[in-house]
Image (cartoon, coloured by chain):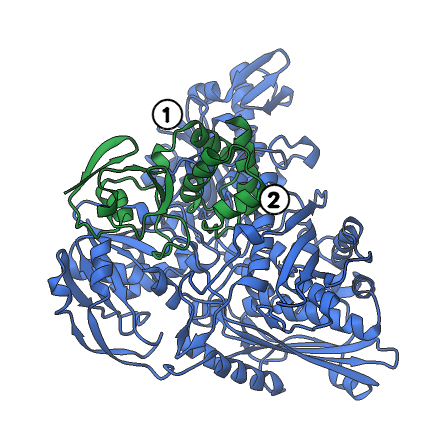
Amino acid sequence: MATIEKISNKISRRTFLAGSVNAGLFMGFGGLLGGCTEQEAVQSLSLPEADLSKVFSPAVWFNMNAQGEVVINIAKAEMGQHVGTALARVVADELGADWASVSIEHVDTDPKWGYMVTGGSWSVFTSFKLLSQAGAAGREVLLDAAAALLGVDRSMCSAANGMVTAGDQSISYADIVARGDISRSFTQEQLDALPLKPASARTLVGKPTKALDIPAKSQGEAVYGIDAELPGMVYATPLMPPTRYGSKINNIDDSAAKAIFGYQQTLQIEDPSDNLQGWAVVIADSFPTALKAAAVVQVDWAAGDTAEVSEADIFAAGEALARDAQQGALVVDDGDVAAAHAAAEDTHEAVYRTGTALHFALEPVNALVEFTDGKCHIHSGNQWQSLILPALASALEMPETDIVIHQYYLGGGFGRRLWGDYMIPAALAAKQLGKPVKMLWQRADDSRMDCVRSPSVQLFKASLDADKNVTGIEHAAVAGWPTLTLAPGFLADGQKESGKYDTFSISGGDHWYSLSNHRVRAINNNLAQKTFLPGWLRTVGPGWVAWGVESFMNELAEKQGKDAIEFRLSLLDAAGKNSGKAPESVGGAARLAAVLKDVRERSPWGGELPSNEGLGVAVGSGQERTMPTWTAAVAHVAVDPQTKEISVKKIWQSIDCGTVVHPSGAMAQAEGAMLWGVSLALHEGTEFENGQVKDRNLDTYRPLRMSSVPELDIKFMPSEEFPTGLGEPPLIAIAPAIAAAVFAATGERVRDLPISIG
Amino acid sequence: MIKFKLNGKDVQSDSEGETPLLWVVRDELNYKGTKFGCGIAQCGACTVQIDGTPTRSCVIPVSAVADKDVTTIEGLNSPAGLALKQAWVSEQVPQCGYCQSGQLVSAEALLRSKSAPTDDDISRAMDGNLCRCMAYTRIRKAIKTAAQEV
């Protein structure tokens, strides 16, 4: 799966520049822009920063002023993962900075930052080496300057805690910056040769700390997109068409709204980018007025042709596609499943499905847009600025470079804010009106036009020998594909010229169990695709693919009469392609086996339970084979024999994500992801009805609340391996583990998510 | 014109009486700590206290608070309020943070009514406050931590 590499490779010819800028020390790590030499780049360090950005595109930079204060710029979105703290700890550790002097700044869009995306649990994984090298390069520069200032040999100097020490002499980083003359560049080769600290020498990475964003969030002082204001702005809320695509406005009648004090007008939106089809926008003096007016403006739409589509239609289309052997792109094609099938003594087949799920980020999507000085300024929280900027450029018919997205805290991301479509109607309205527009989507609208997790259908067929040993598995996974509509350039090529596929909609199918005959097909559900915009929901592919894979593994273990953990361990031999690869998956499936054994020991697996209670197990290796975080979970559930209500009593999970950078943040991500797993397994879900999602607010869409939270027992495996991702992987095993526990408690096999029995 | 006390100060609103208190507090009086989440009193992000009682400000008309005391996160400075804000940091509660003003406002009322709340007390008092990041385990822990400090 090449997607991470595709994104990382957008930063090429990496260079580290260090120099005196505005009486401080500038340290930047990134790529030189086309045509610029190292020498020219170093020379421009003496120029104002604005000029430096013409030759240099830093993925990260940091400044140190003459007081020794370090400001680290963060190009990632803060949406609850405390990403700035984690990334800054990586830089500051290698830099030898005094953590108390470090602060972070979340930056607005600018081409100089390179490719901007926050998702996929990638931030630490894709930044760790880069940021470590940037910190190390900064440390080397400071050590060289300190040696000159102290008049000692460079080899005598060591750096720690914002000081350089040489024998009985020392000098602070602040003094070095104030007195030193620094102008250096490092090539990629020089950076690769820099000494990085061994894990045992780290002072910040892996050590406890408090997240930098938490104090403001505990005082009501954190500023989100919804809090942004500009003088002269008007308030807006959209009127949405009956179908995602193909709806047209016949007529707008706002006569009833005209009686509302503060109502201004309703704009029909023409979107040259075609992202919005049949939208209107209500403009008013205030939000409550806009919301009130929106309720009485009558829009007559000619609906698109998906106005009747239901969840059942999408499932039916999905199952038909799964059963058609000609469909889909080949993602795995090991051995010969057809031969295994022909030779089988027995077979086992199952269809697994997941229903539509919403992001339901608590801050409804919103944007404040102003056109000024020939530029379009957008104030909004967003996860994938580099994806929405071209769409905005097309909608506004202006160059991407004239559009700036000013970043704010995100009141929840979970993948919803990877697609910044909510900026488009606000921007078009602001352009049309010639004044700043602050647009907020009502909650029901936020749900209705959510880029939901697509309903999915998976078909599994296993071939078994006379002893019920698995000789082959054929797996087809069908869903709407986010990447197909939103970022088709990131589609991957299937094997044997079988066509393109969305890696984000099959990840988890290419698991780490060794199977001599294994075929996986990824199939797009074209009815889903044309009915709605499929999105990336927290844990993305593995979030629903593993529901089928892991549940089917539990079925096969049962079929063989084998313990579900022993059964898995027999397939996790870490042989061949499952042996792993440095640095991201050293050890391969052996590490998955290790977390599985660990959770077996820590949980009451195999012990006696009261009647109507059960334990279930599942594993995960998300988000991708190229970035596996090894997880194994055991769930303990109780099922009320009368009401059939399922309650989760406790979940044990063992997690190996390599090096843990920010322990408290890592634990918080694991806790949140596991409870998301419980919520998606038992509490939340909706369905398409008449071409739209049916449940649009909390009266019927019901995520997990405090009173249903199970006990969590989470362990991070001690590791010095390369750090992988954490925001999503601890979710993967939860639903299949709960379903297995329900089976153990009741004997009922559940194949649909969300789970319900009786 | 509707007069009331906001965080101990006399304020007035020129909005129509039926305007939800939330928007008066946020956009007219400019206290942005209180958040909009669902608009139907189900998520708790908009929780304020009216004469000390946690209330969903997204559905309460501003006319209903005439001459009353309204407290938002910005004014949550009772001993319990300060202990909670501190515990939110010490227990590292917030993730995205968007719901936390409402969580704190609900929790403060709980601690004023029960100095040592049980798990059931906490579940009952906090079930109306959705945390989409699902930081529930830490919210519960921080309430207990704060209870010991008050």
Looking at the rendered structure, the kind of residue marked 2 is: Met
Q: Position of residue A87 (x, y in %)?
A: 53, 41
Query: From the image, which quarter does the C terminus of chain A lie in?
Result: bottom right
Q: Label 1 crowding class (10 Å Cα cut-off): few <14, some 14-19, many 20+?
A: few
Q: Quadrant of residue B6?
A: top left
- The residue marked by circle 2 belongs to what chain? A
Output the letter for the chain in blue: A
- Report x, y in % for residue A283: 19, 60
- Circle nearer the N terminus (2, 1): 1
The residue indicated by pointer 2 is A667
* Residue under the point 27% across and 64% down: A238
* Mark 2–mark 1 CB contact (< 8 Å): no
Badge 2: how crowded within 10 Å, few (<14), some, or many (20+)?
some
Can you say whether A572 is above or below A57 in the image?
Answer: below
Mark 2 or 1: the one toward you? 2
Residue sitting at x 53%, y 72%: A355
Residue B50 appears in the figure: yes
Pick the residue in front: A610 or A320: A610
Note whether A101 is above or below A7 in the view shown. above
Horizontal arrangement in the rendering, residue A12 relative to residue B4 (left or right)? right
Kind of residue at disc 1 = Ala
Q: Residue A116, position in %: x, y?
A: 43, 52
Q: Which chain is green?
A: B
In the depicted structure, whether residue A339 falls above or below residue A751: below
Quarter containing the N terminus of chain A: bottom right
